[in-house]
Image (tube, grey):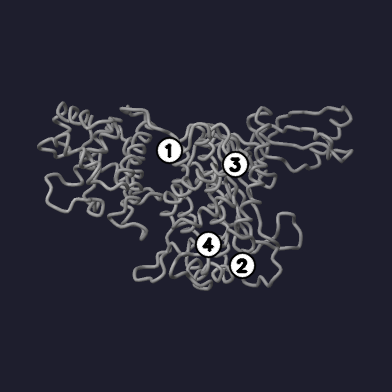
Amino acid sequence: MVASCDSQRSVFRRIAQQSYAEWPAYDSTPLYDQSSLAGLEEDIWTVASTWFDHEDHHSVDEFVSHYPVAYVEFGPHDRYSGATQYKMAQLFRLFLLKELHGWNHETALLTYLTQHPDLRAQLNIETVPDQSTLWRTWNERFTADLRETIEAVARTILIKAQNADVAVPREPERSFPSQDDEANKSDPNDQTVLDEAASITDHVSRIVLPAFSLDRGGGCEIHENAYWDLQTHLGLRERLAANEGARSFVHESSRDRTPLGHAHRDQIRDLPIEQVREMYRRAVNRLLEEVAETEEFFRAGIVAIDITEADPFTGDRTGHEDEIIGTQEKTDEYAYQWATVQLVGNAVPIVLDARPVRKGETRLEIVEDLLNSAEDLVHVDNVLMDREFDSQHVLEMLSQRGLSYVVPKRMQTSEKAQAKRLLRRDQNRYETDRKLHLGKNEWHETTLIYRRKEDSEYDDHRQYSVFMSNRGSSFLTEYGYRWEIESGYRSIKRFMAATTSKDFGLRFFYFAFACLLYSIWRAVDLLVQVELTDDYEHSAIVTADNTLTLLKKETGIG
């Protein structure tokens, strides 16, 4: 089968139904117009991500001939001013075809077009340009930016096709092109890391930024990017509030107009929490697609779900009792709480989704909500959670989804008694099956695993920890990955702007945006490591401060 009107309609219908994709980009965000090459790159990325999943789409040539470019304004990228025989859109397709096949000379393209009359018809080429016309087009008519865009989108198309098991004419590069010598790869110095990080941060920010929008309408004097610039500026310094940050941002920004602190807060407060979450998921999906183009990214695997809390709240919470709730330690203090689901284990530790925690919400509701988001973005095998999620109903829901889990169990009377028996026997490990009552004569079957702590400070049953797993003790070692989410929370809170406002939406946005900055940092670090060393270690070589500083220099999220 070949691409048809029906198959193309199916692709664009799927794109329209995706919550994280907007096409064309210029029509969904004020960042781009119809002549924007960054917007064109974004659009081809969006369409190629879905195009090759269709059962009738097996050819990159067909993608080139059928991709709609009628809306693209190539005029600003055309250095010719007089009348020409060939339109820029036609030539764009021809050179995209040349780049996809990796031909070094125009002659190979001409030969290919001559041998494939059906392709010429699809490209609407009645007469094939001669070799000198093509050479002048690439070297004299096209701008340098347009040439770079053709190279970039060709790489995207090849990777998306290959990921869908579509035959490609050449192997795509799955790392970012670098200007560095090979000698730098084995032992990158600080300057090499920073130089590479600058290039990749610029690329990543252009991918992620369009997911966020303030819906301000037209006619605004201050560009929307200035608000994201300011929010990133607040994350650059610990405990920096909007008013103080807006004042310092005036001097550090190169913008003519920047928002005042109160105006910035007003814009953020107008964003509904569900809209913030939707924008966040859209941004993370784009981030995942970018890092997934490297062989070092492990897309399937382990996620950790956890709840973190802000600093204890000391003011009057009248009217906010459902939002400023008790702390996890069951003290008499109150705090805002946020729940996240994050990749751990072999994967780069990206926060897949975040949500607020309100009074009255069950742990089952929270876990189901976050897992729904996570499974829309990645393939999940295993779930790690803290002991506050040791509800039998949560565990049953995970098993019903076909997921394995490891969760610590709060020790009740029977577990304490068993731990004491193990201590008398000097036994370090013990497994036993347990049925947990779900109600109405229904039970959840799990395995309790007792494990003795090394060098414990206690001399009683507290030497033991008890875990529950539906896959036995073989998965217990994975629980050690959960420490990554705790270390991640420390970095995320470092990126948060300070505020004394009790507005729940504003508080959550500050947390979600900090999660995004953290995830961008970890993604940039992975891509830099892959480019410079051809490998990925969890220990970051790009610092968070470096990434935030580089982001601040870009338009958009930083």
Q: Is residue 355 above or below residue 432?
A: below
Asked whether the residues under the numbered discs 3 and 2 touch, taking CB atoms below 8 Å apart as contact, a structural biologist would say no
The local secondary structure at tag 3 comes to: loop
Asked whether the residues under the numbered discs 1 and 4 touch, taking CB atoms below 8 Å apart as contact, a structural biologist would say no
What residue is pinned by disc 2?
499
Which percent across, then down, holds residue 107?
A: 20, 29
Q: Compute the Cα span from label 3 to label 1.
A: 19 Å
* Image depth: mark 4 or mark 3 in front: 3
What residue is pinned by disc 3?
541
Q: Foreground: 292 or 16?
A: 292
**Residue found 62% across the figure and 58% down from its top:** 360
Q: Foreground: 363 or 375?
A: 375
Q: Earlier in the sequence, mark 2 or mark 1?
A: 1
Corner quadrant of residue 97: top left
Q: Compute the Cα span from label 2 to label 1.
A: 41 Å
Which percent across, then down, holds residue 268?
A: 50, 66
Q: Foreground: 411 or 151?
A: 151
Q: Earlier in the sequence, mark 4 or mark 3?
A: 4
Check disc 1 and give the amino acid type.
Pro
Give neighbour class at mark 4: few <14, some 14-19, many 20+ (Cα, 10 Å): many
Q: Is residue 287 left or right of residue 308?
A: left
**Residue found 27% across the figure and 38% down from its top:** 96
Q: Compute the Cα span from label 4 to label 2.
A: 12 Å
Q: Compute the Cα span from label 4 to label 3.
A: 25 Å
Q: Earlier in the sequence, mark 4 or mark 2?
A: 4
Check disc 3 and give the amino acid type.
Ile
Which percent across, then down, holds residue 29?
A: 36, 58
What residue is pinned by disc 4?
231
Q: Earlier in the sequence, mark 3 or mark 1?
A: 1
